[in-house]
Image: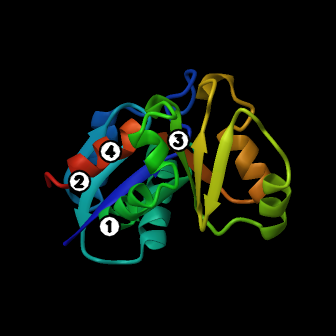
Amino acid sequence: MKTYIALLRGINVSGQKIIKMTDLKSMFEDLGFTSVLTYIQSGNVIFKNEEINSKEISAIIEQEILKKFGFEVSVLVLTKEELADIHDNNPYSEKLKTEKIDSKNMYFTLLSTMPNPQGVQELISNSYKPEEFIIKSNVIYFYAANSYGKTKLTNNFFEKKLKSAATTRNLKTIIKLLDLSNLI
């Protein structure tokens, strides 16, 4: 059995796409996933399953959410090891350790596909000061200097520029998901 983390995009935000975590957990168990844990209302699910392709699992979950709850939700599924690599390869790690940047303003925008190269070039050729970001593969390591609530570099912004579905989590959530994934 392999440990996976499912990140649902845009549920329980501003009264839209409401899914209770107990119902979400039950749905995952009905799909045959085991050791299911949910973390906070934004749609983070840790579970075990036979080792299969993460994209296949994403599609299964997306279809079941549509069937059970009646709306579409993008779901990104990563293995525990993939999420650990994303965390461990954070190019802002040294600045976080030395407190040159505030950890509560560190975000990870995870893309479902590789980003559009033209979009990447456009983004890196512009300045968005005081915001900072580094795109590595299908992850945007993003430091929202004035807080995520005030930035224009939102999940929707990156999706549009990079032509890839995305979901964003803060550093605290990434760490908690990794901790919880070690418990099951």
Residue 114: % across, % down = 65, 69
Amino acid tagged 1? Glu
Q: Secondary structure at mark 3?
A: strand
- What residue is shown at x 22% (from left), y 47% (from top)? 180
Q: Is residue 71 visible?
A: yes
Q: How is the image coloured?
A: rainbow
Amino acid tagged 4? Ile
Which label is found at residue 81?
Answer: 1
The front one of 76 and 28 is: 76
Drawn side of residue 65 relative to residue 132, left or right: left
Can you identify the residue that label 3 sits on?
107
User: Upstream in the sequence, badge 2 or badge 1?
Assistant: 1
Label 1 to label 4: alpha-carbon separation: 13 Å
Which label is found at residue 64?
Answer: none
User: Upstream in the sequence, badge 3 or badge 2?
Assistant: 3
Between disc 3 and disc 2, the foreground one is 3
Up-down relation of residue 9 to residue 116 (above or below)? above
The front one of 108 and 73 is: 108
Between disc 4 and disc 2, the foreground one is 4
Drawn side of residue 184 relative to residue 90, left or right: left
The front one of 15 and 79 is: 79
Can you identify the residue that label 4 sits on?
175
Label 3 to label 2: alpha-carbon separation: 19 Å
Can you identify the residue that label 2 sits on?
181
User: Upstream in the sequence, badge 1 or badge 4?
Assistant: 1
Up-down relation of residue 132 to residue 74 (above or below)? above
Label 3 to label 4: alpha-carbon separation: 11 Å
Residue 173: % across, % down = 38, 39
